[in-house]
Each structure stands twice: as structure tokens, then as C-alpha cells.
Amino acid sequence: MMIFKRKNKIPTTDNTKDKSMLARLKSGLSRTGTGLGDLFLGKKQIDADFLQSLEDCLLMADVGIEATEKIIQQLQQQISRHEVNDQTALLIALKKHMQDLLRPAEQTLNIERSGEPFILLVVGVNGAGKTTTIGKLAQLYQNQGKNVMLAAGDTFRAAAVEQLQIWGARHNVPVISQASGTDSAAVIFDAINAAKARNIDILIADTAGRLHTQTNLMEELKKVIRVMQKADPGAPNETLLILDASSGQNALQQAKQFQQATNISGIVLTKLDGTAKGGIIFAIAEHLQLPIRFIGVGEQAADLQPFNAENFVNALLENMTDDQIR
């Protein structure tokens, strides 16, 4: 077992550290919100054509058929009751319906420790951003005054171990790792025992990326959890599934398969800043009914934010005037 720790922090460069969380979110969601913003530019009659254009915008943003139909039907009912008769009223109603769809998924991850380390297992497909997310979480919790340890459980990709070690050094966090090709379950088992011995508050364990269609690797993930429970019967306390927002509807299929293989308890949606498909968050909330713990809207550590439904919808509609979105 190797323990990687460096006493001196590697300084980080964050040119946007003065931006508020909402400003970061607005910037990150600009690609997804563009179509909706353009739709509301200028005075337009609220009629069937307008609603069709709105429906098209929502579908193009990968909001999903079911969630989009629910939103449009609610708006049509309000229009028929003369509750909505202009763009401003429709925009206010749209915002409310979108927030209502997302609000059940707005559940903060509460880290509670009762004498044992809180064990957080991170899973997902290749390239979703697991290792980077782990580094950001490490900094987040360390800034909250918690002692954090990382487990380099992605033993199939040597770069993943190195990347995690760099993050550990940057945040002055110990990393438990072994040679490339070592059994992932063994690494995480050792990390749990080390975390207990050192009185660590939070242990965050990485795992190898695996496609949701790879049955053998999904079975291996089940084995990792069984071995973890030998070291701690309550492990993992949280299993976070990392989803890449740019995957669109495919992210939803990934989530369904992982949910069948493991007890997923939370979602992290990454790379929202690099896609026009950020509306997938509505389909995820509608279909999975799982907490969306965090969203990623940029490369900096501060760009990983706890999910807030109201802030998300406000940011998504950022191209509209302040008077409209109030």
C-alpha cells in the first residue's frame, strides 16, 4: 500500500474566483439557454406556433419528451384559463414549472459522521469526469474543515492514479494507492482501514470507468461494494454516479443501468458548460427520482456546485431581461 501525501499545497490558479456561484452557473449554462433566450426576444403572440417553437427548444436542449410534454401541457392549460396571455406571464409560468420538475431532486448531501469515516464511492463511465470531480469534492470538504482521504480505486488507468495523487498533493490530502492493475476492491478495502486508523472524516473512493453495457465490469463493481462492506458493514454511505451532461439522453440510459447494478444514492452532472444539452437534468430528475447532489459548470473547483433548482432555472434563462425573469 502506498500513501501519497505532500506537506505543501500546490497553489491553484482561479481567474474567476471573484465570480459569484450564480454568475458561474449562468456562464456555464449559456449554451443550453441560448435557444430559449432567442425565442423570447421581441414581442410575439402566444399561440400554437409559439408553443411549438418552445417545445422544439426544450427538446433540442434534451429536456426529454415526457418532461417537455408536461411543461407544455401545463402552459396550455393556463393559457386556456386566461392565466397566461403575454410573454412575461408565460415566462414566469415556464420558470415555475421547470423549477417544480427539478425541486424534488434538490437534496443536499449531508455528511454526518458517527465515530466512523463517511465513505463516498464514485462510479460512472469512462470520461464522465469522476477523478476530476473527486478532486473538487476533496477541496470542498477540506474547506469545510473536514479531514479527507482519497482512494485511487481506478487501477486500470495509470493516469487516473497519477491524476488523483496530483489532486491530493494540491489539497494536502492523503491518497491510498497501489500499483496499476491491482484489484480495485483491495485498494479501497485498505483505504477504509487506513481512514479508520487515522480518524478521517471523509473517504472518497474512485473506481474504474466502465460502460453501462459491460456486464462483467458492472458485476465487478458489485464485488467492490461487497469487499468494502467487509471492512465497514455500512459502506458505502453514499454512492455518487457521475454523468456527463454532453452525453444527453445517453446519460439517462447510463444512469438506469448503474442504478440496477448498484445502490446509487446521488447524481453529479458534469460538463454543463460544454454542451447545449444541459436540459438532460430535467429528464434525469423526472425518470430517476434520485437526488442531484452537485453540478459541474467549469474547470475550477468552485465550479462544482450543490444543485439548486431555482438557481439552475434562473441561469438557464439568462438571456432574458432581468424584468422578465423576476
Image: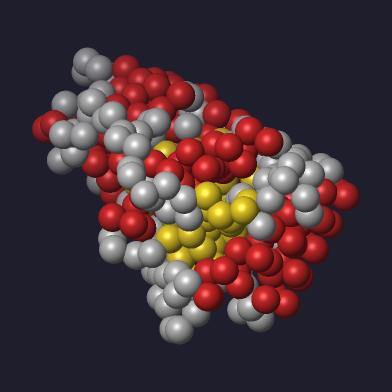
Q: How is the image coloured?
A: secondary structure
Residue farthest right in this picture = 216
Q: Quadrant of residue 303?
A: top left
Query: With 93 as the anchor, is 125 left or right in this view?
Result: right
- The residue nearer to you, when weighing 303 against 37, is 303
Q: Point out residue 171 in the picture as x, y percentages from the top left corner.
A: 37, 47
Q: Is residue 149 above or below residue 214?
A: below
Q: Point out residue 228 in the picture as x, y percentages from the top left corner.
A: 69, 69
Q: Point out residue 242 in the picture as x, y percentages from the top left corner.
A: 57, 46
Kindly identify the residue that appears in the image at 57 percent across and 69 percent down: 194
Q: Please identify the quadrant where the C terminus is shown.
A: top left
Q: Quadrant of residue 120?
A: bottom right
Residue 112 visible somewhere in the drawing: yes
Query: With 54 as the anchor, is 25 left or right in this view?
Result: left
- The residue nearer to you, when weighing 156 against 211, is 156
Q: Point out residue 98 in the picture as x, y percentages from the top left corner.
A: 38, 45
Q: Is residue 98 above or below residue 107?
A: above
Q: Please identify the quadrant where the N terminus is shown.
A: bottom right
Q: Is residue 164 above or below residue 274?
A: below
Kindly identify the residue that appears in the image at 31 percent across and 34 percent down: 12
Q: How many marks?
A: 0
Residue farthest bottom in this picture = 115
Q: Is residue 25 above or below residue 141?
A: above
Query: With 272 as the anchor, is 129 left or right in this view?
Result: right
Residue 284 visible somewhere in the drawing: no
Kindly identify the residue that appears in the image at 34 percent across and 37 percent down: 10
Kindly identify the residue that appears in the image at 44 percent across and 32 percent down: 272
Query: With 62 as the anchor, is 76 left or right in this view?
Result: left
